[in-house]
Amino acid sequence: MVVLRTLVFVAGAAVVFATVRSALRTFLVPRALQAYVARFVFVAVRRLFWFRANHRHDYERRDRVMAFYAPVSLVALLATWITLLYVGFAAMFWALEDVTVREASTLAGSSIFTLGFARPEGLPAELLSFLAAALGLFLLALLITYLPSLYSAFQRREAGVSKLEVRAGAPPSGTYLLQLAWRVGRFESLHDLWGAWEDWFVDVDESHSTFPSLVFFRSPHSDESWTTAAGAVLDAASLYTSSIDVQRTPDAEFMIRAGYLCLRHIAGFFYLPVDHDPAPTDPISLAREEFDAAYDALAQAGLPMKGDRDQAWRDFAGWRVNYDRALIGLARLTMAPVAPWSSDRVAEANFVPPAFPWLRRRGRRS
């Protein structure tokens, strides 16, 4: 019996340790670390939402349903952590005290929720009760302090997305962004836009790596998405650099680099296939005919185009290949609204991650 109680105590302590470790990796460590409890909860909730937001429903229905996905997953994650703490401490109370399973469960619940109607006997059990109360409050305080940082990062992201609608339309298009800037005589101001979006990508890279759940928070407007906005501004900069006959400036190129690094980092966290060192000649999701149509539209709008269209296509494809797979993968993961050259490449209307992601080995990030 002593051996059994010892094993049960060790098992309960392991559950508590794993729960606290998961919370620390999810909330406190400022980098993209895999927390398998959190990942399991998000995957499980995603599969439940899939029944109400799959390919059999139109986009408006899917968007309304998926707007609740990230908040519900966070609440479910807190409930899962509390449940694991409850099970772990109940096992340890049963191993320390000469009580029944029901009495041990009552002690665990009273301690974690600081109710105080059940009091253990003996110094070890009292210390265990204090620890349970501290950890219960700790998890709740973590979530409460986590939410303001989460929504602050969300508001910064969406401010950029909403501003882009003014320049790139809805759904956003890189071609339209360049046409409108030329038409209204603000083509020179694109340098400021590239710099602002370089900062936007750096901020999104940092915030969405620290708080991966932000990836699934949808924009306030159903026709907007952070993934399609990112694709539009990256395509505009790629067209600007490859096809527009203007003096070369590094602003657009630095912004493209910040963009594809951001998208690659986020896509890699979710196990989306990404080539971190693509060749300029690797295939992309755009056909040459689509590029030619954009080239002609820009020329008809009066923009000064480079004379060698074939070289312009090779240069454009050489820029696009850096973010093409990551952009398409994230658009599919987030169920983004249809937008040219990004989410319109998605073959499926939904994406369900693997049920057991810890069985997959992560590739080394270059």
Image (cartoon, helix red, strand yellow):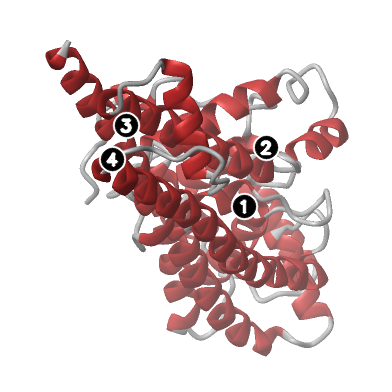
Whole-percent x, y for residue 241 in the image: 51, 71
Task: Name the residue: 69% across, 55% down.
Answer: 294
For the N terminus, give its image quadrant. top left
Identify which amino acid the numbered label 3 is placed on.
Val
4 or 2: mark nearer the eye: 4
Q: Is residue 321 visible?
A: no
Q: How many discs mark residues in the rendered view?
A: 4
Q: Nearer the viewer, mark 4 or mark 3?
A: 4
The answer for how far apart the CA atoms under marks 4 and 1 are is: 57 Å
Q: Which label's residue is closer to the chain start, 3 or 1?
A: 3
* Circle nearer the N terminus (4, 2): 4
Look at 76% across and 79% down and name the residue there: 182
As shown in the figure, which amino acid type bears the numbered disc 2? Met
In percent of width and height, residue 151 lies at: 65, 64
Alpha carbon of mark 2 to alpha carbon of mark 3: how far? 34 Å
Local secondary structure at mark 3: helix
Tag 3 and tag 1, C-beta contact below 8 Å = no
State the residue position of label 2.
Answer: 335
Is residue 3 visible to us here? yes
Q: Which mark is residue 227?
A: 1
- Callout 4 amino acid: Gly
Please rate how many residues cluster around mark 2, counting C-alpha atoms within 10 Å: few if below 14, some from 14 to 19, many from 20: many
Q: Earlier in the sequence, mark 4 or mark 3?
A: 3
Q: Which amino acid does the dot numbered 1 rest on?
A: Thr
- Report the front residue among 41 and 95: 95
Q: Earlier in the sequence, mark 2 or mark 3?
A: 3
Instruction: Name the image quarter holding residue 236.
Output: bottom right
Q: Which residue is mark 4?
A: 122
Mark 4–mark 3 Cα distance, whole angstroms, equals: 23 Å
Q: Farthest front residue?
A: 121
Point out the tag, 4 or 1, that comes first from the N-terminus.
4
